[in-house]
Amino acid sequence: MKAIITGVTGQDGSHLADLLLEKNYEVVGVARRCSVDTTERIKHLSSNNKFKLIEGDITDVSSVINIFKDNDNVDEVYNLAAQSHVATSFKQPAVTWDVTGKGCLNVLQCMVDLNIKAKFYQASSSEMFGSNYDIDRNGVKYQNEQTKLMPNSPYAIAKTAAHHAVRIYRDAYELHASSGILFNHEGPRRGENFVTQKIINWIANFKKWLSYNSVDDFPVDFTNDHIVIHRESFPKLRLGNIKAHRDWGYAGDYVKAMWLMLQQDKPDDYVVCTGKTYTIEDFLEEAFAYAGIEDWSKFVVIDKEFYRPCEVDYLRGDCSKAKSKLGWKPKYDFQGLVKMMLDAKL
């Protein structure tokens, strides 16, 4: 079996490459050319003779054509390439559209034009639901495959367009094309500008700073913006809306669902999640407590600069379909995820 993974240098791409190589796939990883090294997450694959890293850009149709011409015997294509940071999408909406939205369309159209018979996976996102949700008979709010999409950011708009493109190309051209509507998935490989990793990194750096200052316990002094010990200061953790609810899982679990979707006889779309929701406050409490700090509130500053122009307040997925049809379920819960991420840093 041979697979192409766009966005292979990202969190999900690196986990998926690991999974496919374990299953004895030949893996072609596609990454955009960059003047700085972005391959940290896949350096461990450099000596694997079944893994090949190539340059490519899904915003450039000629680049996509060449990728397929050089790999015309491919069995599966996983499109994970995206500008995936929501806050950045408000500042760079056109770039986000080109990569996250149009890029998917380019890949689909090239598969049709070149008569590529591979199975296709698109990385859709829970951000597509925006402010919308359904309510069950017990009053619990949730989102599943039937929930109406209502994107609240340029990123979510681009993901929604790509999601609909997959459906259209599946129906119009009978492509084996599936979308995974993944809720927030994290882990030690998560980018540092995402809130979970931002919290984890801050705690790790703070613990290191304490050790440099030979401090094993508190008390310490606090200003509005800093923590002070022995006349040395450390900046507080600055965050935006910590009341937002998210359904957090482990990325290593979620890539298994991606693979399972392409093993089905018929293509379809699936929600992938844990089915539980927590606030960013909950994440703070869990992470700080695990690091031995009981009252996290003294160490955090709420900064309006980090608020989204249009917030998504509540995400909680229902992955009943993935469980029943794919036989998939997450292994890591919220508490296990937080501990894993902090252990990796500490």
Image (spheres, rainbow, N blue to C red):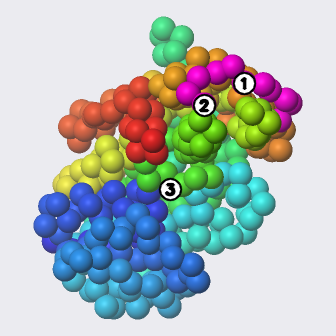
Neighbor class of circle 2 (other Cα within 10 Å; few <14, some 14-19, many 20+) is some
Q: Which residue is mark 3?
A: 163
**Crowd rating for badge 3 (residues with CA inside 10 Å; few <14, some 14–19, many 20+):** many
Q: Above or below — where is 35 with respect to 338?
A: below
For label 1, the residue is: 220
Are the residues flagged by discs 1 and 2 in contact, CB closer than 8 Å?
yes
Give the amino acid at mark 3: His
Above or below 234: residue 73: below
Count up the numbered dots.
Answer: 3
C-alpha distance separating marks 1 and 2 = 10 Å
**In magenta segment, residue 272:** no
**Residue drawn at point x = 50 percent, y = 41 percent:** 184
SS at mark 1? Answer: loop
- The earlier-in-sequence mark between 3 and 1 is 3
User: Can you identify the residue that label 2 sits on?
Assistant: 215
Q: Is residue 1 left or right of residue 104?
A: left
Residue at image coords 19%, 80%: 49
Question: How far apart are labels 3 and 1 at the CA level?
Answer: 50 Å
**Amino acid type, mark 2:** Val
Q: Amino acid at mark 1?
A: Val
Residue displayed at 46% across by 62% down:
10
Nearer the observer: mark 3 or 1; the answer is 1
The picture places residue 6, in percent across and down from the top left corner, at 42, 71
Sequence-wise, the earlier of marks 3 and 2 is: 3
Q: Residue at x 76, y 56 (%)?
A: 90
* Label 3–label 1 contact, CB within 8 A: no
Residue 269 in percent (x, y) is at 38, 48
